[in-house]
Image (cartoon, grey):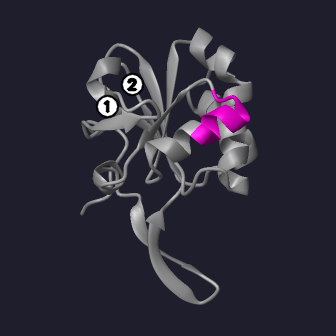
Amino acid sequence: MTELQEGQKAPEFTGKDQEGHDISLSQFVGKKVVLYFYPKDDTPGCTAEACDFRDNYESLNGKGIIVLGVSVDDEKSHKKFIVKHNLPFTLLADTDKKIVEAYGVWAEKSMYGKTYMGTNRKTFIIDEKGNISHIISKVDTKNATNQVLELLKLS
């Protein structure tokens, strides 16, 4: 699979949100979308990133930016994560790994000398026409919102 590039059309997807509803990228044409991929609900880095987006959600929303988080956790796990941390945005359950594979973030990882498949943390900013305007490969989990706003020159 070739790696996605800025300027490319963002791959269309449909996934289940924390309530079991279908959410498709095409629903957000005309809006900027922050599509962020993270490894696992309620782990330290993922919680820091989600809470940073939560703490800045009103500002992002006020600028017309939609925040969507994606991991391979299921809907029940997402619901628990949202309730525990009072997250005001949608998390998509990609249990069949179609979205992570389409975006090239499902990859071999290693920890403590063991290799395994997992989700690489990466953020895609998708413009109003459905094109990838920016890709953040080195996500600063505690300052994820600032990374987005600086790239969009909205900070």
Q: Which structural element holds mark 2?
A: loop
Task: Say which of 141 and 149 sits in front.
Answer: 141
Q: Residue furthest top?
A: 62
> Which residue occupies 73% across, 45% down?
48
Q: Position of residue 104 (x, y in %)?
A: 35, 57
Q: Which residue is mark 2?
A: 127
**Residue 2 placement: quadrant:** bottom left
Q: What residue is shown with label 1?
A: 131
- The magenta span reads 80-87
- Disc 2 + disc 1, Cβ < 8 Å: yes
- Distance, label 2 to label 1, CA atoms, is 5 Å
Q: Residue at x 65, y 22 (%)?
A: 57
Q: Secondary structure at mark 1?
A: loop
x then y, percent, for residue 136:
53, 46
Image location of residue 73, percent across then percent down? 47, 52
Relative to residue 75, is residue 129 drawn left or right? left
Q: Is residue 63 above or below residue 36?
A: above
Q: Is residue 43 visible?
A: yes
- Which is more toward the observer, 5 or 118? 118
Q: Residue furthest bottom?
A: 113
Q: Amino acid at mark 2?
A: Asp
- Whether residue 132 sits left or right of residue 91 in the image: it is left
- How dense is the environment of label 2, judged by Cα within 10 Å: few (below 14), some, or many (20 and up)? many
Q: Is residue 4 left or right of residue 121?
A: left
Q: Is residue 116 magenta?
A: no
In-front residue for pair 119/128:
119
Q: Would you say the magenta stretch is mainly helix, strand or loop?
A: helix
Quarter the C terminus occupies = top right
Residue 26 location (% of width, % of height): 27, 24
* Dot 1 amino acid type: Asn
Quarter of the figure that contains the N terminus: bottom left
Residue 37, above or below 24: below
